[in-house]
Image (spheres, rainbow, N blue to C red):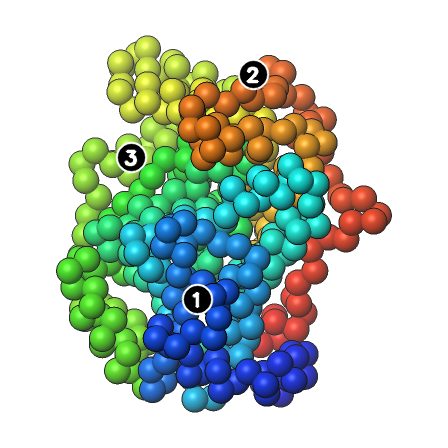
Amino acid sequence: MQSILRRYRNSLWRFNNKRSLCSLSINGPVNDLDDQVLVEGKPASRTAILNRPAFLNALNTYMGTRLNKLYSNWEDDPDIGFVIMKGSGRAFCAGGDIVTLYHLINEGKLDACKEFFRTLYRFIYLLGTYLKPHVAILNGITMGGGAGVSIPGTFRLATGRTVFATPETLIGFHPDAGASFYLSHLPGHLGEYLALTGEKFDGAEMIACGLATHYVHTERLPLIEEQLGKLVTDDPSVIEATLEKYGELCYPERTSVLHRIEMVDRCFSHETVEEIIENLESYRIETNDAWCSSTLRRLKEVSPLSLKVSLRSIREGRFQTLDQCLAREYRMSLQGISKKVSADFCEGVRARMLDKNHAPKWNPPTLEQVSEDMVDQYFSPLSVFEPDLELPTKLREAFN
């Protein structure tokens, strides 16, 4: 099986770089770009460290390319039993580098934007079909693309510092990087709630709904990393036993939305965004419930077009595989940055990340003005000159 995979990889690149990839450490980077993804080597494991702490480890094209090469190399190496990913500083990964995307779009460099999405989505698919156990240490901010490069793996270790969200509607975009797959498989209609509102979850909430597999108090994280580093195994059950032995039980706070999951289902199960808002309004009037009021405020802050596009994306994701979701999200993302339907993405980034006035001027400005044709455009095939995302589906599925 492995020999077939090897034939489809760039063996020349591996030969020339294998020694540097396996020996690269925090103290010995090859160059400044390689600093953005560092590598720690242990007897039977490798750790990829996302290392742009000043930017909350936001992902760029180079990081995606390097992760693809590293993980492909490690998958083929019989001496490596499993792989770990973590982040530097106070974040695991805050998502994609949307400020860079903003500037590339405004400079007319759409090909560079397309390469970013292609590279990132291909890595997410590689992780989702990886032949070796994977542990993502989600110590800190884990949002958008940061969730995308961790949740498809085998284990996700949350901590007391973990902050999860898919906040793309706040910047006029849609939850991507595989979000329509994993959000749509959460209990009930929790995925719709998280996708539309962009609300945050802590580590305990991630455990309770299945986004994370294990939890450790932050001060005990060095111990669990030390124990993982001592393992010489490729057996997921051995890794899981270590995570369970040194991890802790945790429970969501009483104020968590997970304690009102029936209300989430009641409101967010409806077919349209308008019906969701109407039911939230009705329940707020009936009960004067503070959660309904805060949820309504959130929904009225974000892009109306993004709300409708994101709801449809989650609903379609419920009936699709990971590769199908990624291929569709790629199509949606290119539509979103092209400005053919709306410039909401650039406007959202401007308002929240650049000017920071938090007063975006959405276009269209209301749900009523978002037509079905506009939403359909996001899901339409790309032009004959723009190929869809290509993934090695048949090759990867042969080994999973």
Residue count near mark 3 (Cα–Cα under 10 Å), binned few <14, some 14–19, many ≥20: some
What secondary structure is marked by label 2?
loop
* Residue 283 visible to the viewer: yes
Which residue is at the far left?
Answer: 219
Which residue is at the far front?
Answer: 31
Q: Earlier in the sequence, mark 1 or mark 3?
A: 1
**Residue for badge 2:** 366
Q: Earlier in the sequence, mark 2 or mark 3?
A: 3
Residue flagged by tag 2: what amino acid is it? Thr
Question: Gap in Å between the C-alphas at discs 2 and 3?
Answer: 27 Å
Question: Gap in Å between the C-alphas at discs 1 and 3?
Answer: 39 Å
Q: Earlier in the sequence, mark 1 or mark 2?
A: 1
Residue flagged by tag 3: what amino acid is it? Val
The residue closer to the viewer here, 19 or 130, is 19
Q: Is residue 307 left or right of residue 229?
A: right
Residue 280 rendering spot, x and y as whole percentages: 39, 19
Can you tell which of label 1 and label 2 is closer to the viewer?
1
Residue flagged by tag 1: what amino acid is it? Asp
Residue 374 rendering spot, x and y as whole percentages: 69, 27
Circle 2/circle 3 CB separation < 8 Å? no
Residue at the image position 60 percent from the left and 53 percent from the top: 116
**Residue for badge 3:** 257
Which residue is at the far right?
Answer: 384
Residue 166 rendering spot, x and y as whole percentages: 43, 42
**Residue for badge 1:** 35
* Residue 156 visible to the viewer: no
